[in-house]
Image (tube, rainbow, N blue to C red):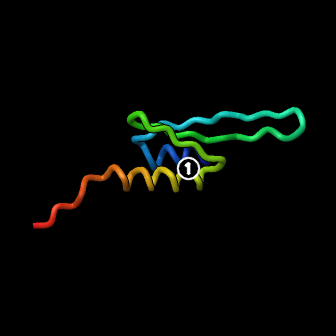
Amino acid sequence: MDDLSQLRAEYPAWRFGTVWATAASGPDKRRLWASRDGILLTAWNAAGLRTQIAHEERQTEPPVRLS
């Protein structure tokens, strides 16, 4: 399973894609993106994107109510 397929399986609420950056003097480089509810995250690799998604999900979780 490739990294985008793994991300889609791990985070089904998010949309994923790639953008290729090209340069005449060097190798092409792939940038990954994820979006949800108007939020756009980007990273050079799946690990970086996972970190950003986890951070974003912690920010948007409702607070735990203590009784």
Q: Disc 1 designates what residue?
A: 49
Residue in front for this viewpoint, 45 or 39 = 39
Residue in front for this viewpoint, 34 or 3 = 34
2 left or right, relative to 56: right
Q: Position of residue 3 (x, y in %)?
A: 60, 48
Up-down: is 20 above or below 58?
above
Q: Residue furthest left?
A: 67
Q: Position of residue 34 (x, y in %)?
A: 51, 40
- Give the residue at x 55% y 50%: 49
Position of the C terminus, as image quadrant, is: bottom left
- Give the residue at x 33% y 49%: 60
Q: Residue furthest bottom?
A: 67
Q: Position of residue 50 (x, y in %)?
A: 52, 53
56 left or right, relative to 7: left
64 left or right, relative to 12: left
Up-down: is 20 above or below 56?
above
